[in-house]
Image (cartoon, helix red, strand yellow):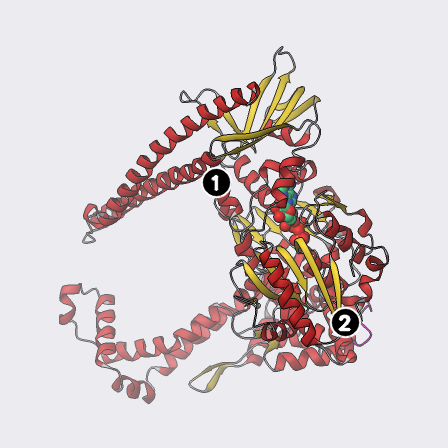
Amino acid sequence: MNPELRREQKRVDLVMGLIAKEIDRLKTETARRKDEVIHIRRHFWDEVKVNTDTFDDYLETIIGLRQEAQALSVSQGSHRHAYRRLSTLQRMEESPYFGRIDFTENGESVPESFYIGISSLTDSAGEDFLVYDWRAPVSSVYYDCQPGPAEYATPGGAVRGTLDGKWQYLIRHGILESMFDTSLTIGDEVLQEVLGKRSDKQMHNIVATIQQDQNWIIRHDRGRLLIVHGAAGSGKTSAALQRIAYLLYKYREYLNADQIILFSPNTMFSSYVSNVLPELGEENMQQVTFQEYLEHRLGHEYEVENSFGQLESVLSAEDTGTKRLRVESIRFKSSVRFIGAIKSYCRSLESSGMCFRDITFRGRPIVTAEQMTEQFYSLDPALRLYNRLEKLKDWLLGELRGVQKAEWKKPWVQDEIELLSEDAYHKAHRYLAGKRGFTNEAVADYEMEPEALAKLMVHQKLKPLRRNVRAYEFVDFGALYGQLFHDPAQIGKWAEGKTPAEWEAICRMTAGMLEEGRLSHEDATPFLFLKELILGFQSNNTIRHVVIDEAQDYSPFQFEFLKHLFPAAKMTVLGDFNQAIYAHAEGRTDFGALAGLYGPDQTEMINLTRSYRSTRPIIEFTRKLIPGGASIIPFDRNGDRPSLEQVSGYEELHSRIGRKVEDLQRQGHQSIAIICQSAGESLHAYESLSGIDGLKLIKNGTGEYGQGTVVIPSYLSKGIEFDAVVIYNASRHVYGDESVRRLFYTACTRAMHALQLYSVGEPSPFLEEAIHEGALEI
Ligand SMILES: Nc1ncnc2c1ncn2[C@@H]1O[C@H](COP(=O)(O)OP(=O)(O)OP(=O)(O)O)[C@@H](O)[C@H]1O
């Protein structure tokens, strides 16, 4: 061992010793805190005397309860805090730090060494930092600067000085295996090693090798909207997750993980990325898919198609006319123009056109839709729709009180009373006794008046109606949305005459679906938008950051919607238009239109062009599949050239894939994906390849990303990666239409180390350039 390594190993030993001591202390502390929590929970009610006899007793009970709950919450908080620190230190036990900078601050004569790791660590006196958190202000020098003049921002202003040198450390279980002088580029050696590893079933943090442009994204902190457009594998998801960790660190006093929400493309992706923040000692942010959100808000009234269903219906449409109609419908209903049309429609509802539902009781209408319309439009027209609906709601509740008065003497009430079960009868007795002031012990003394019971009976029967009125169920949103499509010419005017060519047919198609209780994916967001415009947006003010991954898949409509939904939040949007697989994005190549969301002053954009996921030969191939692909820069990692085998039929295809998978497994690839275009093709492939050991079929709704060999539809493979990818059938028949080019590109870019394509018959025209230029072995 050379003297420098020996010296550095000594330091590692010192730090490891401190970590071990701190871990011991925290183990004792977490055990103690845990006991404390269990004790408080177990004896919670022993400590609180519940007495509500007098107001003072009641008050004392409440105060006692509060104190106990507070003690429990403090203990739980301390336990959580100690436990999290313990987990972080246990991770640091594997590798206490990964980098070092020597920085001489202006005015000082000797450089100071800063060691950088996943979290800070001070000496036992708590005075000197032995390790700096990668998110600390000074650590940005490590990611951003080359030797020479350097500076970093702190809350107190910029600190200037000279960066004298920069090192990368490879420490495993306390042993310093190597250290590199990385003054010029950050750890290409280490990056090589990290990227050359086999994939894992969960994504890992990249803090040891964050690149300069990624660091810019992570630390960017100006304006409302940050847009990242980056090539496949350029680290967008990684940068987004480390950015969340950074924000949680920087604003730890005001921000917690629950105030950040990540919109992910599907639930499998959510599970795939859920490890990164805990690995960095942070709690996970909230994760949701847009579909989950839609379903949550739309309830069960409609059968709501999901985005994959929409894609499948376009992919599998046999007849070109139906397909064109659907694509046109999707594109128009996702556009900013349609948002404008819906807003105009809403304004028109201020003077006429509201749709209501009759309120019926015991089979007959007690307030009709016509009465509601009359009442609604008799209200002050200066009031907003929502305020008028509130007034209408109060009026309806009044009408229900009138019904109650009118009904209690009717014979049906007596009939119902006679049918009451004993239990229900006693319940009513207890309830009325309580209302008359009888205490629990004296309930038996109360003699129930028949009149009170009859009134109670009617009151109970009307309860669901009152609940529905309070929830604005009397507004017929389905009819309101459907009405939009009754007069194709009117919406044309609102959309400034820019409706699609087959607009009338689209209107008929939409109205038909709504009547059948179905809501297509492209209608779901506009439907909800209309509802919210009328009822007032149910916004969420607690969320401070919204991160949208795979953002090319969101329509302008969805962005507008999210902006309204999270009015207090900043947004980070990450995507790649070369992977835009949905019909609404056809023809769109960048996020230019998004700048209008918060205005140019509040918007920052960055492009990532270097790609890390795949070997150089794979990237040299995939970038030939898309226009402008030449600007994608591969990270220099060796591997075999992707190869294409043309077969004459499915039988041959399946036997070749079987042999190839065996071969890949033998080479040690742990995750192998056979990627098909659609769900139908996946099922066919899965059934035909059943001879492959442990083969799994991934379907929409598969919640966990596992390892092994899988068959997966192209659109579900978004955002994730595999050691080796087999493209099931890259033929002209399957990937011949320009509309699926991006889908094909997405599928091919999932491969980290090996990529094999098969084609039954003539290969896809997308491959021509790659074949011509020798990027694909045939
Ligand atoms: N700086 C880095 N250091 C180490 N690994 C990195 C770095 N940047 C990216 N990677 C790795 O590259 C792979 C791709 O990263 P990621 O999934 O974040 O890219 P992406 O841009 O979101 O890709 P896509 O758009 O194709 O889904 C991951 O394995 C990630 O760990």
Q: Is residue 254 left or right of residue 17?
A: right
Q: Amino acid at mark 1?
A: Gly
- Residue 328 — which label? 2
Q: Can residue 8 be seen in the rendering of this structure?
A: yes
Q: Residue at x 25, y 86 (%)?
A: 418
Residue 719 vertical placement versus 185 (above, below) = below
Badge 1 or badge 2: first in the primary sequence: 1
Instruction: Measuring from the top left, give residue 91's x and y in whole percent.
Output: 46, 38
Q: Quadrant of residue 309?
A: bottom right
Q: Nearer the viewer, residue 633 or 28?
A: 633
The question of residue 415 being in magenta is answered with: no
Residue behind label 2 places its C-beta within 8 angstroms of ligand 1: no
- Residue 506 — which label? none
Q: Nearer the viewer, residue 10 or 421?
A: 10
Instruction: Measuring from the top left, give residue 731's x and y in whole percent.
Output: 76, 70
Q: Quadrant of residue 701?
A: bottom right
**In the picture, which quadrant includes the C terminus?**
bottom right
Q: Nearer the viewer, residue 745 or 300?
A: 745
Q: Residues within 10 Å of mark 2 (few under 14, many from 20)?
A: many
Q: Amino acid at mark 2?
A: Glu
**In the picture, which quadrant includes the N terminus?**
top right
Is there a contact, CB below 8 Å, between mark 1 and mark 2?
A: no
Residue numbers of the magenta segment? 496-502
Q: Can residue 310 be seen in the rendering of this structure?
A: no
Q: Which secondary structure lies at badge 1?
A: loop
Residue placed under numbered mark 1 in the picture: 281
Residue 720 vertical placement versus 513 (above, below) = above
